[in-house]
Every structure is written in structure tokens, then in C-alpha cells.
Image (tube, rainbow, N blue to C red):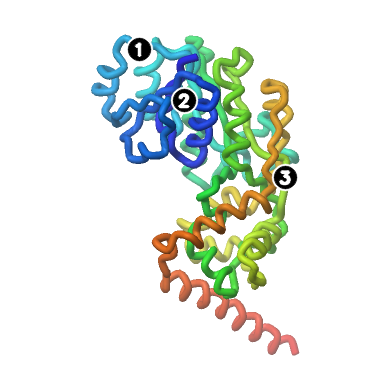
């Protein structure tokens, strides 16, 4: 099977690249070549910028593929470009969407592929929904062989699940760490190696054409547990400080309203029975308390990643102090 990845070296796509390479599949990566050292030797790289449509069209002239996957499309015009480029040269086109597209807040659990898609809080999610609608319209009107895949929070051995070194560093230094909400929201974390196993089973699969799948683990953790697991991996006590998500969104709209109010502050528990029917034998096997250990080792071993952010520390400390001050004033008024 001949497969083309647009991208192929990101957190999700690199593990799929490695898996297909180990299976001896004929795989091509179309990207700028910035992470060439990560690409297995038997994987062919087409060095190009997908945004330069005319150049890519010339490079791919005469080539055909069984599957084309775009890992780096985020808005409808990029999918319109992909349709022009690939409509006549592939038997299957896979679009990587997002589980954050599901209705926020959800009205029922667990989340299935039939859960409505609607996210008023996050433009990123709405753009992905528009992409999905465009592709499914093409499937219905012209038979364009699309498959839509919705990852949720997927991480790798060098990821930082908490959003960067700053939060990780505060845990390590035993400083108070802001946890949005009360920390009891359930969340699903999926290792990219587990994601790759299910994803590989969709490639060239006739049962996947014209359909949508999410791929996640079956392990649901609260955010309190997720932060505690990080502290345990670092061998330090956790000092959590809970602050309402709405309050944090008001303070830092760009950072919190989309990612938290539009996603992480809602329970994210998924029914994976659909992907398991289409890819028999799939099961996610990486428990998060084990998956986080290489992440901790990676960040602690690479000093260049440990860049202090005094502004972030001051912001956290100021927010925590302000909430404590308000609470103290209210206690005095009450008594």
C-alpha cells in the first residue's frame, strides 16, 4: 500500500510513521524536511511546502496513492487545496480533525461519534468542524473517499501534557500550581503509540470511507490525578490551588477560554467501540502513570528546555494571592 503523509513528524504522526515503517509499508512524507533526522531510513521524503500548491502539483505529477493523510490542515481553504491536489490520485483521504469539536458542554456520556459537533468557545474547533462539513459534502456529492479522525489529548515521550515547561517547573520547585476548576473533571490522555495502532488499521480500510472515528484510550483521570501523577514522577509533593475556569478565562481569555472552557473543563470520556469494530484487536495499553515517566526524564535531561519564565511565575503568584485576599475579606465580613 502506497501512503502519503502531509507532515509526518509531529507528536501524533511520527509514531504512525514509525509503525508503518516497521511494517514495511511504502510511505512518503511531504514536508519541509525540518525533522529529517527523525524519519526512518525506509520512509521516502518529498521536500516541499504544501502551501505552494503549484509546486506540489508538479512534484506529484504522475504519482498515485492508496491513502493520503493531511495532519496539518486546520481551515477550509487548506482542504479545498487538498481536494484539488488529491481528488484524482488517491483512493482514500484522511483528515485529522479534533475531539474538541464535540458539543461543549456535552449533554450525554460517554462521547460517541454521534455526539453533536458544536463548540462556541474555541475557534480552532469551529474551523475543524467547517473542514469536516466541507469534506463530508464532497463525499455525499461526488464520492470523494474521505475518512475523518478525531484525536483527543494525545501525547508522546517528549510532550508536556500540562502545556509547557512553566507548569512542570512549578511542580518541580514545589510551588503552588493553579488547577482550573475543582480538578474533578474527567479527562482522557492517549499515548501516540496507542493512537498509531488504531490509525494504521484505518488506512486502506473500506469500512472507514465516508465515516468519522475518534481514537482515545479508555483510561479516564481527573485533573487532580493528572497533576498528582506528574508530581509523583518528579518525586515531589503536589501543591494544588484551584481557581474557577471562568475567572481564569476572564483574566487570560486567549489561553483559557478555548483550551479550557471550550475543552478541558468538560468531562472527556469516550466510547471507543466504533474504532474497535473497524480495527479488531485495537486496545490502548499505555497507562498514563507509566507514560508520563519518559516525559519527566526528557525534560529533566535537557537543560535547554528548562527556560525560566519569571512573568508566568509572577502571574500565577499574583492570581493565587488575589484569590486568597478576597477569601480573607469575605471571611471577615461573615464573622
Foreground tag (1 vs 2): 1
Please tell me whether mark 1 sits on a helix, a strand or a loop: loop
Which residue is painted at 26% across and 28% down in the image? 52
Label 2 – label 3 distance at C-alpha: 27 Å
Residue nearer the viewer, 139 or 246: 139
- In the rendered image, which residue does mark 1 sit on? 63
How crowded pointer 1 is (Cα within 10 Å; few <14, some 14-19, many 20+) is rated as few
Which residue is painted at 44% across and 59% down in the image? 302
Residue nearer the viewer, 67 or 324: 67
- In the rendered image, which residue does mark 3 sit on? 219
In this orientation, does residue 25 appear?
A: yes
The numbered mark at residue 69 is 2
Expressed as whole percent of the image width and height from the top left, the position of residue 201 reads 61, 23
Relative to 13, does residue 167 appear above or below in the rendering?
A: below
Please tell me whether mark 2 sits on a helix, a strand or a loop: strand
Of callouts 1 and 3, the N-terminal one: 1
- Left or right, residue 75 beside residue 259: left
Residue 82 appears in which quarter of the rendering? top left
Amino acid at each position: 500500500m502506497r501512503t502519503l503523509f502531509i507532515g509526518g513528524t509531529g507528536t501524533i504522526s511520527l509514531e504512525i510513521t514509525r509503525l508503518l515503517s516497521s511494517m514495511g509499508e511504502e510511505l512518503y512524507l511531504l514536508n519541509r524536511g525540518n525533522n529529517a533526522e527523525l524519519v526512518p531510513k525506509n520512509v521516502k521524503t518529498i521536500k516541499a511546502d504544501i502551501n505552494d500548491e503549484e509546486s506540489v502539483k508538479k512534484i506529484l505529477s504522475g504519482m498515485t496513492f492508496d491513502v493520503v493523510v493531511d495532519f496539518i490542515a486546520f481551515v477550509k481553504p487548506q482542504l479545498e487545496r487538498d481536494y484539488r491536489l488529491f481528488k484524482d490520485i488517491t483512493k482514500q483521504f484522511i483528515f485529522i480533525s479534533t475531539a474538541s469539536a464535540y458539543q461543549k458542554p456535552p449533554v450525554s456520556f460517554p462521547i460517541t461519534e454521534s455526539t453533536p459537533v458544536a463548540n462556541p468557545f474555541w475557534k480552532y474547533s469551529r474551523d475543524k468542524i467547517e473542514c469536516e462539513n466541507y469534506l463530508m459534502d464532497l463525499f455525499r456529492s461526488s464520492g470523494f473517499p474521505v475518512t475523518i479522525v478525531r484525536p483527543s489529548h494525545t501525547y508522546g515521550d517528549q510532550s508536556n501534557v500540562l502545556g509547557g515547561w512553566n507548569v512542570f517547573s512549578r511542580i518541580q520547585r514545589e510551588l503552588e500550581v493553579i488547577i482550573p476548576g475543582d480538578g474533578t473533571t474527567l479527562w482522557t490522555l492517549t499515548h501516540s503509540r496507542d493512537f498509531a495502532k488504531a490509525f494504521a488499521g484505518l488506512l486502506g480500510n473500506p469500512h472507514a470511507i465516508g465515516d468519522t472515528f475518534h481514537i482515545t484510550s479508555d483510561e479516564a483521570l481527573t485533573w487532580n490525578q493528572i497533576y498528582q501523577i506528574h508530581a509523583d514522577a518528579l518525586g515531589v509533593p503536589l501543591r494544588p490551588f484551584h481557581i474557577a475556569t471562568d475567572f481564569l478565562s476572564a483574566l487570560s481569555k486567549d489561553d483559557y477560554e478555548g483550551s479550557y472552557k471550550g475543552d478541558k473543563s468538560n468531562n472527556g470520556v469516550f466510547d471507543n467501540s466504533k474504532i474497535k469494530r473497524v480495527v479488531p484487536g485495537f486496545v490502548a495499553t499505555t497507562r498514563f502513570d507509566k507514560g508520563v515517566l519518559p516525559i519527566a526524564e526528557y525534560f529533566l535531561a535537557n537543560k535547554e528546555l528548562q527556560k525560566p519564565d519569571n512573568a508566568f511565575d509572577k502571574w500565577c503568584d499574583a492570581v493565587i494571592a488575589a484569590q486568597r485576599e478576597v477569601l480573607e475579606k469575605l471571611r471577615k465580613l461573615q464573622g
